[in-house]
Amino acid sequence: MRARALAAAACAAGLALAGCGGGPSGNLDRSLSYFPATTPAVAVVTTDLDDVQWHTFNGQIAPLVVHASVRTLLHETADRTGLSFGDDLKALLGNPLVIGLVPGAGPGRPVVAALQVRDAGRLPRVLRALGFVAAGSADGARLYRPPLVVGRRLAPAPRGRPALLAVDRDVLVAAGSARVLRRALAGRRRGGRLTETLLRRALPSLPTHPFLRVYGSLRTLAGGVGGNVPWFRALRSYGLAVKLKQRVIEARAVVRTASGRVRLDQLPLAGGYAAARIPVREDQVVVGLHDGAPSARFAGALLRGTRSPAGALVRARRLVVGVIGGTLVAAPSARQARATAGEPTVVLAGTHGALTVRADLATLGPTLASTFGIQLGSLDEAVGFAIADRQGIRATIRVGIR
């Protein structure tokens, strides 16, 4: 019950961020301007509850995570706060919600969420009903303290509670701490901010109108890791787009590199579109490589390993990694590596590129449930494949829903 109450509170906060307006939506520049172009991660989520992808999320995915649909949680929030779901809550939803990280904000969680509203005049009543309390101003924005979760109720914030929400003209901004919120508000007026144009240019190969988009700077995220490997030095950005279809979750990802700074023989995966074969096994996770030699060389360079007398194997620290008979193997010794190779393989329909992965989520379910509290009882098989070239890596993952 406590988790459900927290989920309802999160919906209330998300409502304040994602739904206060009802006119035509504009671009994302105002919401994205609170994040620098070098942010390591930013996500854009649609909030139109009538969208077909939201129907899939509410009916098939949300119950796995919070044991209820978002629509149900919003109904409960409306009932407890004296608001109307249809007139006060659902009518306000529709614009994309932007959530991301603000680097350099000091210790703590540098998480910021922002959304440009369509009717700022409706904000005071909605915020007051949800339990937000005015708490001064910063950089021209009005600050608010968030409500407390008391059992299954939302109680007005007491004095002394930090202000974690701001109304900056027609944009709602929330953060994980007061310091991060003030940094985001001050940063919006500086140069070098994230824009919708930059987002689209960075993700040209991803599908349009996804349920979720994710973008981040790999130069910021990597922070110099793997600097001795040319491919890591060529990293620029990454992106992810998730579409929810009937009984299928499809995610497409891209890792972009500066093509002029990396050679084909320096890629972590073999180039080309020929599909990789995977072992015919019912393991929890099975991985296949079309040509594992480039990956073995890459692993050796990354871990500064040395090539074994077997030729195709690389000894990296305490493991021997390589390809035998077309199968990627990792074992404590070359002898054990050879013992695991030579199994029959198959090409999965609809896959392309040097890497193929298949995971039995029904088998993995108990492990993930005990570790992360996520129930995967309705999820079936997951299949992914990746294609590599000098411009980066493009991957597709499909997860079936029973």
Image (spheres, grey):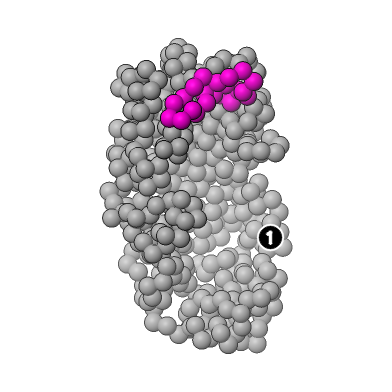
State which region is magenta. Answer: 145-166
Q: State the image coordinates of residue 348 (x, y, percent, origin top left).
A: 35, 69
Q: Quadrant of the C terminus?
A: bottom left
Residue 21 left/right relative to 301: left
Residue 383 left/right relative to 103: left
Q: State the image coordinates of residue 25 (x, y, percent, origin top left).
A: 40, 25
Say which residue appears at 42% left-offset and 60% top-offset.
366
Q: For this rendering, which residue is in front, 31 or 11?
A: 11
**Is residue 160 covered in magenta?**
yes
Q: State the image coordinates of residue 72 (x, y, percent, origin top left).
A: 33, 33
Say which residue appears at 32% left-offset and 54% top-offset.
378
Q: Is residue 309 visible?
A: yes
Residue at numbered disc 1: 226
Q: For this rendering, which residue is in front, 153 or 358?
A: 153
Residue 359 is drawn in which quadrant?
bottom left
Residue type (three-letter) at the residue carrying disc 1: Gly
Task: Judge whether 355 appears above or below 24 on screen.
Answer: below
**Is residue 34 covered in magenta?**
no
Q: For this rendering, which residue is in front, 220 or 60?
A: 60
Q: For this rendering, which residue is in front, 211 or 297?
A: 211
Q: Residues within 10 Å of mark 1 (few under 14, many from 20)?
A: some
Say which residue appears at 61% left-offset and 18% top-offset.
159
Q: State the image coordinates of residue 187 (x, y, percent, origin top left).
A: 65, 28
Say which residue appears at 34% left-offset and 55% top-offset.
377
